[in-house]
Amino acid sequence: MTTNTILPDVLQNKRKLNKIAVFTSGGDAPGMNAAIRAVTRAAISKKLKVTGIRHGYQGMIDGDFIPLTASDVSGIIQSGGTILKTGRCEAFKTPEGRQQAYQHLKRAEIDAVVVIGGDGSFSGAMEMSQEFDVSFVGIPATIDNDIYGTDYTIGYETALNTVVDAVDKIRDTARSHGRIFFVEVMGHEAGLLALDSGIASGAEVILIPESTEQHEELEWFLNKGYKQKESSGIIIVAEGDETGGAMKIAEKVKVEHPDLDVRVTILGHIQRGGSPSAKDRINATRMGVAAVEALFDDQKSIMIGLVNEKIVQVPFNKAVKLNHSIDLSLLEIQRLMNF
Ligand code: ADP
């Protein structure tokens, strides 16, 4: 890697940064590695030292730190998961846990931290920065794409393509046997992955936590639509749908419609894995560079986002408290396709 400056010359090292840390936290998402690589290389190009914190906030509490060089992050842009490992950490939710984490950061002479994760991880960063003098900048990475203030989160596009690919395969079986498949997609509170994957795979019905109107549509499809078409059915169910998920609703349908051949597929963790899509790699790289720029500009407690393809900075308190709204007109479009 060259030492060419990739950050604009006008940016001063306002905070006199010397060493930054980067870590991944919460649920893993494809593209996290691309973000680690971008943060590391952007920082090194500005002559900063970089420390990787392993295992999320638990690693911060335990002082599980490793130095990162430009070559340590080579060959990872195409891999899913995270080389720094990730995890959830209850101890960080306590003042004692955060105190311990702070002591490790100070001992390692870390001036600022880039956190790659979801809104839970940003809540933790916000909490700590209110108690101690530590600057955090966040990079949104979650397959749910449910964070306020950004059009994209890292990992969403890859997960969407994984789901569509899987549903296409399920459709082959559904069509060959004339079956109805209830396919459960990740999303406890957010239905965007279900909604987008349902449209992209031509699903007959999509059930998401944000809307209950589709239950009538499901009834219509089971009673009339399926029989008219004499073909197959794909019902995409977000795991957080009020019915309690694909298994529960399929059990009910089997009882109410014993004549139908009903099956269930829960896609599960295949949705989180795999090589990140080109778009996720590009977004992760842009956000990683922007996070280092923001730290150079003495920004703290902000998340880097993308709105209309442009980099934006969103205060953590907005990113974690406000909801990412979902465009329910997409359900209308989906209905139109199944008229
Ligand atoms: P995600 O970042 O993917 O939303 P979680 O919600 O599980 O994932 O959060 C990841 C971790 O962030 C938690 O395990 C915890 O260590 C930390 N965290 C979340 N919320 C808080 C909070 N309010 N205070 C302190 N730490 C928090």
Image: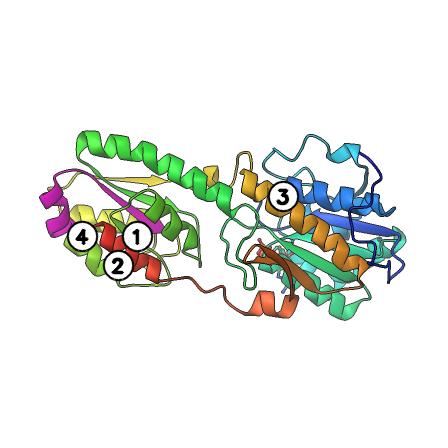
Determine crowd level at label 4: few under 14, some 14-19, many 20+ residues with C-alpha closer than 10 A: few
- In the rendered structure, find residue 206 and report the number of the disc placed on it: 1
Q: Residue at x 85, y 39 (%)?
A: 3
- First of labels 3, 2 by sequence position: 3
Q: Amino acid at mark 3?
A: Met
> Are the two marked residues, 1 and 2, in contact with CB atoms closer than 8 angstroms?
yes
Is disc 1's CB within 8 Å of ligand 1? no
Q: Which region of the structure is painted magenta?
A: 221-238
Q: Is mark 2 within 8 Å of ligand 1?
A: no
Q: Which of the two discs, 1 and 2, labels the residue nearer the N terminus?
A: 1
| Residue drawn at (10%, 42%) of the image | 259
Residue 17: percent from the left, percent from the top? Answer: 87, 56
Helix, strand or loop at mark 2: helix
* Type of the residue with mark 4: Phe
Q: What is the C-alpha distance between the residues marked 1 and 4?
A: 14 Å
Q: CA distance from mark 1 to mark 2?
A: 7 Å
| Residue annotated with mark 4 | 339
